[in-house]
Amino acid sequence: MGKGLCKAVGLLLLFLALTALRPVWAQYKVGDRARDFRLRNEGTGRTFVSLSSDPSAAGYVLVFMGLQCPWSKAYFDRLIRIDRRYRPLGYPVLLINPNDPNQIPADSPEEMQRAAREQAFPFPYLFDEVQDVTRDYGASRTPHVFILCKEKEGWMVRYSGAIDDNTEFPEKVTVHYLEDALESLMRGSFVRQESTPTVGCPIAWKKR
């Protein structure tokens, strides 16, 4: 075996070894089954919450939501309204803060508690301290919303993307992506737009 080929094989083996050391994360797509999780609720009581915590839930509106992100803050009132409308119908809202507070101190658990009180959140605000849940879902920006449905196969992802088509001006929204998807699912109909682009703040990842 020539020296050039030996060097190439050596580099390939090194690359494969380094790749094997990197964690492999499932990034859920629409139609995938999501695993349950257990995260601390910093919003209303510091208890732990999982998808199985509410046996009456037919599904969840799961929103990755950075506390200080202006795109996220613009949706606080809208998500409260959505929760009040769809929680009684079986689809409560769950917020998850995916950010590393060492990178963004204003996204700390203490600030999450303060925001939950000031905004009177009717839903849990969960802290993904290890960021495993965020990586599983493949969220990269906030806000990023997923609809989960409880089906015989498990918790199935049925929508991924934006909440609506106008972050800045709620009165000018023309397409309610999230609510349209929820209405379709509750009718047992096909979700016309099951995935939409997200616009918002990049997630602050832990330094590894």
Image (spheres, grey):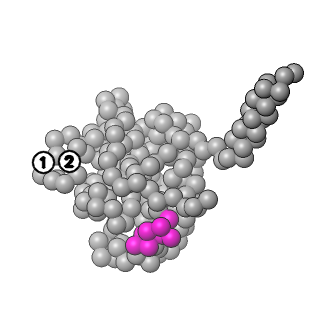
Q: Nearer the viewer, residue 175 or 131?
A: 131
Tell me the kind of residue under disc 1: Lys
Q: Is residue 139 above or below residue 44?
A: above
Residue visible at 56% across and 36% down in the picture: 153
**Dot 2: what SS?**
loop
Quarter occupied by residue 158: top left
Tell me the kind of residue under disc 2: Asn
Q: Main secondary structure of the magenta part?
A: loop
For mark 2, what is the residue? Answer: 166
Q: Is residue 145 left or right of residue 156?
A: left
Spot the residue most to the left.
Answer: 171
Residue visible at 32% across and 32% down in the picture: 193
Quarter occupied by residue 50: bottom right
Q: Is residue 78 left or right of residue 18?
A: left
The answer to whether residue 26 of the structure is visible from this angle is yes
As drawn, the label of residue 98 is none
For mark 1, what is the residue? Answer: 172
Q: Quadrant of the C terminus?
A: bottom right
Spot the residue most to the top.
Answer: 1
Mark 1 surroundings within 10 Å by alpha-carbon count, few (fewer than 14), some (14 through 19), many (20 or more): few
- Give the magenta part as a residue range: 100-107
Q: Is the Cβ of the residue at disc 1 closer than 8 Å to that at disc 2?
A: yes
